[in-house]
Image (spheres, rainbow, N blue to C red):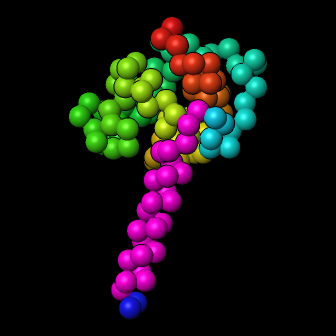
Amino acid sequence: MRKALYLSLVVLSSVLILASGCSKDNDGGGGASVDCATVTNKAYAANISPIIQASCAIAGCHAAGSTNGPGPLTSYTEISNAKARIRTAVSSGLMPQGSSLSTAQKNSIICWIDGGAPNN
């Protein structure tokens, strides 16, 4: 009985963690409210890609061939396809694991996504 209860708690906890880190849409999920009118560094090529390449698309995380979370985050298409999951994980502080982004970096990513994630 104890093993079944423990296993149930582990499974439930895992589901809740995965759901909170990966399932919210681009609707302010993750608790971040940012005034994007004041954020100027939100261009994909100049700002967003360098942050993600340095902090996320690294070996053991979201490099080529990754099966973690949304998979690899090495191209605009991969990043754009995962934008809702990225927004939630970044704004909640769950990602990147093992390091952190500055408030300015988080705001850049959030505002880029909230602005439609253009390939600019």
Any magenta on residue 13?
yes
Q: Position of residue 100 (x, y in %)?
A: 54, 41
Looking at the image, residue 3 sits to the left or right of residue 97; the answer is: left
Say above or below: 20 vs 77.
below
| Quadrant of the snapshot with the N terminus | bottom left
Query: Can residue 91 be seen from the camera position used here?
Result: yes
Q: Residue at x 46, y 75 (%)?
A: 9
Any magenta on residue 17?
yes
Q: Position of residue 4 (x, y in %)?
A: 37, 83
Q: Residue at x 56, y 37 (%)?
A: 25
Q: Tell which residue pokes out farthest to the left in this image.
A: 65
Q: Residue at x 48, y 11 (%)?
A: 119
Looking at the image, residue 84 sits to the left or right of residue 36; the answer is: left
Say above or below: 86 vs 1.
above
Q: Residue at x 40, y 90 (%)?
A: 2
Specify the segment rendered in magenta.
3-26
Q: Nearer the viewer, residue 15 or 93?
A: 15
Q: Residue 77 occupies which quadrant of the picture? A: top left
